[in-house]
Amino acid sequence: MKYRHLTEGERYQIQALHAEGLGPTAIGQRIGRCKSVISRELRWHQHRSCYHAGEAQRSYRQRLLAKGKLRQPWGPAFDEIAVPLLKG
């Protein structure tokens, strides 16, 4: 299976579901991602038991920019809209 990065929308879904008290397995099932991806994301970006999607997304974009691989502006919209339609 090909790896794909979490989208900004997925990060906000993780934030909302984590705030409801759901664990990585339940969050992964809800958003269609592996529980290890969710667990790793929470571990990397969780501060004082709160996950902040905005901070996680900023950190992700800074890492891409440092590598010189900033995505096209339409990339996140494509991930959010077109990819689910293509899977369906």
Image (cartoon, rainbow, N blue to C red):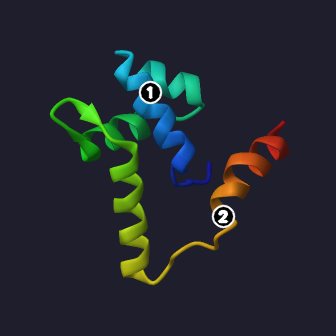
For label 2, the SS is helix
Q: In the picture, residue 53 is in which quadrant?
A: top left
Q: Is residue 62 above or below residue 29?
A: below
Q: Count residues near mark 1 (Cα–Cα under 10 Å), then give few for <14, some for 14-19, many for 20+.
A: some
Which amino acid lies under the numbered mark 1 shown in the image of this protein?
Ala
Camera-side residue: 4 or 11? 11
Residue 74 x, y percent position in the rendering: 70, 66
Work out whether mark 1 precedes mark 2 in sequence or the reverse, and give the earlier one: 1
- Residue 23, visible in the rendered structure: no
**Is 47 left or right of 41, judged from the image as shown?**
left
* Residue positioned most to the top: 21
The numbered mark at residue 16 is 1
Q: Quick check: 18 left or right of 33?
A: left
* Residue 23 occupies quadrant: top left
Q: Which residue is mark 2?
A: 75
Measured in 3D between alpha carbons, the distance from the residue under mark 1 to the one under mark 2, in whole angstroms, is 23 Å
Residue 25, image x and y in percent?
Answer: 43, 22
**Residue 44 seen in this snapshot:** yes
